[in-house]
Amino acid sequence: MSSLNISIDIDTDDNDFVCLDHRKTFEIICHQCNLLLCSKCSTDHNKQYEHNSFCDHINDIKQSLYKYQSHSESLLLEKLTTENNNNKNNNSKSIFEKNRILEVWETIKSSNSYFRKLESTESEIKDHFHQMHQYLVVEEQRYQQPIQESKSKTLETIKNNIEELKHIVNIINLEGSTRYESDIDQSSDKSDEDDYNNSADTTDSYSIESIMESLDRNHSLLCFIESKDKTVFDISGCNGRSSYKDIESLILHSIQMYNQQFKKSYVKPNPPPDYQLYTEPINTTMIKQVVDQSINLSIKQPSHLKNIYSIPGFVHSPPLLPDTHLFFAHQDKGAIIWDFRSKTSKYLHFDFDFTNTQSSIVSVGEHLYVFGGSNNLDKYMIISKKTLKGKIHMLPLDDSSNSWISACHDGKNHIYLVKTLPKLQMMTITLYDIKSMKFEQQHRFIGANSQIMSVFYNGLFYSFSKNQDNILILDPIKGTHKFFKTLKFKETLAACTDGVGNVFLHSEELFIRINLDHMKLFTLSPVKINSKVQDNAAKPQTLSMTYYRSSDKEHFIFLFGSPSTQRYSIETNTWLPDVFSSYQIYKNSLCPTITYQI
């Protein structure tokens, strides 16, 4: 049976182990203070600090170490675990190695397990991208295969036609064969030597690659034949001329052989396929979107940090970002910027009417984007978060209505704009490219539904109807979509999201939260609102609602234009007193609000 051997190197002067006050050898250690004590020091120390439960005598330590030395490793760990648990239950003193050796061992084991898990995850990532690579290889081969087949057929055509041309040229040259033979006899010695020295070059000259290189260099038939007169078109290789009485007989027989070999088998070839290849620069953004859709590496939240909200279903918490600001616009072509940290505000004016833009404002990077509105059918504005200045751009007019647009950012390079086609009773989704500032219509759906809010989450696009009880769920990669029935209410007056998978919807009487991870609905405490904020309003008017996280323990929702501002606490599920009452002189109904960070 093997034993646990522990080796410790100690390089210390013996005088260091003598108490300077009592000139006695140290015999005791206080684990709490990490002090070495002699017997007299120990008495005084425990009277002063009451650390008797933390002190061990050297004899007890030696006896314990001896017991552990005599056990195998497995029995040692079992013994340590048992004794450690007993000590915890009995609240008795514990010798240092009982606790620490287990902690070290558990750390080693857990670190090893964690490393193996990292290896496994790394291998999964590698296998995943290997599959993608294999797919690209197959796709490359699919595109190359017809080209390669055509190349092979073309080479065969060139070989056959070169062979035919060779026979024709040889027939033409037969007339001068007598003179040629005389020249050959006079230079036979020299040609034999040249043939020996250039045999390798001559072999290469007969290759199809060499022939095609000559075709590239020579653009006329005569030049091409002359370039190959010592190899492909060399008439010295014509044998059997001595069996003919005259050159005329040889020519006639050669023509007969040519006709027999080439004329009967000749079929006018079909024109080869004219391939046209169209390529565009690879859209790396789209590729990244596909990759992100197929693989996701995230850090799992520790269990003690989960469910920080008191309301069931919250398992995410947005990152806490400093310098959060609230942008809320009003109908007098202006907006107010509220700084949550300094509790100060700024008043802004824009040459832009914010009416009916509650759902068309988006925060992306250093800018806010506001699209359309009832009085801006051909305009959209980009506002700098730093300078707080806006620049107006032209919004394309099409069959769809720009008076009400639901907008959201896909987290990459596009803003999705949901509009309606009233005449065709259809809904459209147009993509706005942030970099190129171009618009492109991508999707159409039956039903002219105005959307109260749209959001991107985990690679999917969600759009919430303003006057129907359904949610459009679109997979932009696959191009598939479906509708989810909320079965709660049809008239949604206000909506917002916390950005991590929770959407809040408020009607005149109900307030709900939808968790997009599980598509579960939770009924919350509603607030009594007056949505008919305009005189002679035929139906309830939509309001503006936005989410704000003030700390790890405080999360709020602000509801504007009801007609006063309401504040909802997510933790307590209650509505709190208005905090922006001084700004109610501005008409902010039908106008957007949004929180953003700098």
Image (cartoon, rainbow, N blue to C red):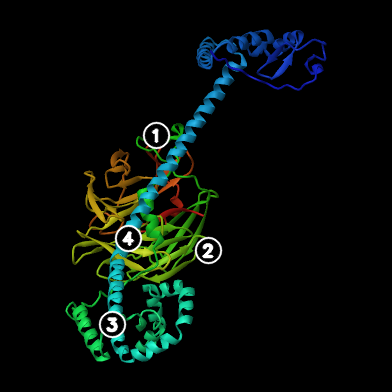
> Could you tell whether 592 is left or right of 336 in the image?
left
**Rendered position, 125 above or below 334:** above
The numbered mark at residue 310 is: 1
The disc placed on residue 141 is 4
Residue hosting label 2:
387
First in sequence: mark 4 or mark 3? 4
Instruction: Between label 1 and label 3, give the one nearer the viewer.
Output: 3
Of residue 456 and residue 451, the one placed in the foreground of this image is 456
Q: Residue at x 82, y 17 (%)?
A: 15
Query: Residue 128, percent across and down?
Result: 38, 47
Tally the marks: 4
Q: Earlier in the sequence, mark 1 or mark 2?
A: 1
The amino acid on which the numbered mark 2 sits, given as a three-letter code, is Thr
Q: Which mark is residue 167?
A: 3
Q: Are the residues flagged by discs 4 and 3 in contact, CB closer than 8 Å?
A: no
- Alpha-carbon neighbours of circle 3 within 10 Å: few (<14), some, or many (≥20)? many
- Please name the amino acid that badge 1 sits on: Ser
